[in-house]
Every structure is written in C-alpha cells, then in structure tokens.
Image (spheres, grey):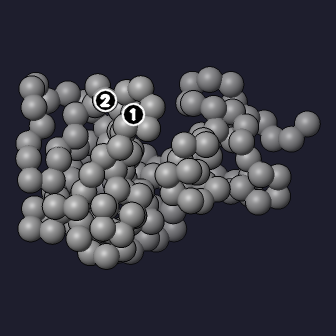
C-alpha cells in the first residue's frame, strides 16, 4: 500500500469534537482495522460490534477549537474509552500505558509506539478498504447469523494472539 495517503477527517455526532488523521511517510495506509464484540465495546457503543482504526497518537490532530467536550472514561483497569460529553458519541479506545494526545494538549513523557483506536463510524467518509477488518476480536461473543457474517480478517475467540475462532461447532 502507499506510504502517503490523503488525510481522513471525522468527529462526533454534534460536531463538538473534530479530528484529522494524517498518513505521513512511515505510517501505513490503510491502518490496521479491527472489529470487536467484547461486552464493554457493546455497552460503550450500543452496538453488537464495533469497527476501529488502530493509529499512532501522532497521526491524530484534534481540533482544539471544538474538542472541548472530549472526555475519557476508565472502563476497566488500564483501559479508557473516549466520547463526546455533549452528544455521547463513542470515539476512542486506548490502554493506560499507551499515551494519547489529548485535544488541546501534548502527550506527557517520552514518545512510545503507542496506539489509539478510533471508532470508524466517526469518520466523515468510509470506503470498502477502511470498512474491511484485518482482525476480528471477541468472536466468542458472536450472535449466530448476525455478527458472525463478516468474512474478512483473522478471527479470535477473545484478544488477538489467543485462541483462534473457527466458527460454530
């Protein structure tokens, strides 16, 4: 895939939180794409499955004139979910040890190869490339005939690197 790609833009439903995703040389396009069917993603999004883009925090530029309503909730030890406090749009997921460039701020400490997951549904435009997952997580929670129908990507019972999901017995 190409080393440089046009930026992607997105934001929450009410427009209070806006961002731009850059793909400078050295950052792969398309980024890694995953779906998740864990209980926490379901509760956070209100959907049976979520689709995420895995990005380096430096790729994301938050519009600091509008991103004042971005907030994070610690959903489990070491895990944070970002959302808009005005409209409730689910926007991000990250681990605590991963640095995140907060809207209006810079990451603290030394820069690491951390990742932040952006909800694909918050993008202004989505094509088939961005909508096709590389991996599917927590397929053990799949709803037969409903959320098990996406054929693309490697499938895991829970987290990646664990037991592969082979479908229904």
Q: Nearer the viewer, residue 38 or 6?
A: 38
Q: Which quadrant would residue 80 be assigned to in this image?
A: top left
- The crowding category of the residue bearing disc 2, from other C-alpha atoms within 10 Å (few below 14, some 14 to 19, many at least 20), is some
Question: Disc 2 on helix, strand or loop?
Answer: loop
The reply, left or right, for residue 122 in relation to residue 143 is: left
Up/down of 20 relative to 32, above or below: below
| Disc assigned to residue 79 | 1
Expressed as whole percent of the image width and height from the top left, the position of residue 103 reads: 15, 53
Q: At 26% across and 75% down in the image, what residue appears?
A: 15
Q: Which residue is mark 2?
A: 96
Q: At 41% across and 58% down in the image, what residue appears?
A: 90
Expressed as whole percent of the image width and height from the top left, the position of residue 122 reads: 38, 66
From this viewpoint, which residue is outermost toward the right? 169
**Circles 1, 2 touching at the beta carbon (< 8 Å):** yes
Q: At 64% across and 56% down in the image, what residue appears?
A: 48
Q: CA distance from mark 1 to mark 2?
A: 6 Å
Expressed as whole percent of the image width and height from the top left, the position of residue 67 reads: 18, 62
């Amino acid at each position: 895939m190409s080393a440089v790609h046009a930026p992607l833009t997105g934001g929450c439903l009410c427009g209070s939180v806006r961002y731009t995703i850059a793909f400078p040389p050295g950052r792969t396009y398309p980024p890694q794409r995953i779906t998740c069917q864990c209980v926490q993603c379901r509760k956070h999004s209100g959907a049976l499955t979520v689709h995420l883009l895995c990005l380096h925090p430096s790729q994301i530029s938050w519009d600091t004139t509008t991103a004042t309503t971005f907030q994070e909730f610690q959903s489990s030890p070491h895990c944070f979910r970002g959302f808009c406090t005005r409209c409730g749009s689910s926007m991000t997921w990250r681990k605590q040890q991963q640095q995140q460039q907060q809207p209006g701020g810079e990451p603290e400490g030394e820069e690491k190869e951390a990742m932040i997951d952006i909800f694909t549904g918050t993008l202004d435009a989505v094509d088939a490339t961005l909508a096709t997952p590389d991996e599917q997580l927590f397929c053990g929670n799949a709803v037969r005939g409903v959320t098990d129908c996406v054929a693309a990507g490697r499938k895991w019972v829970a987290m990646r690197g664990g037991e592969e999901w082979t479908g229904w017995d």
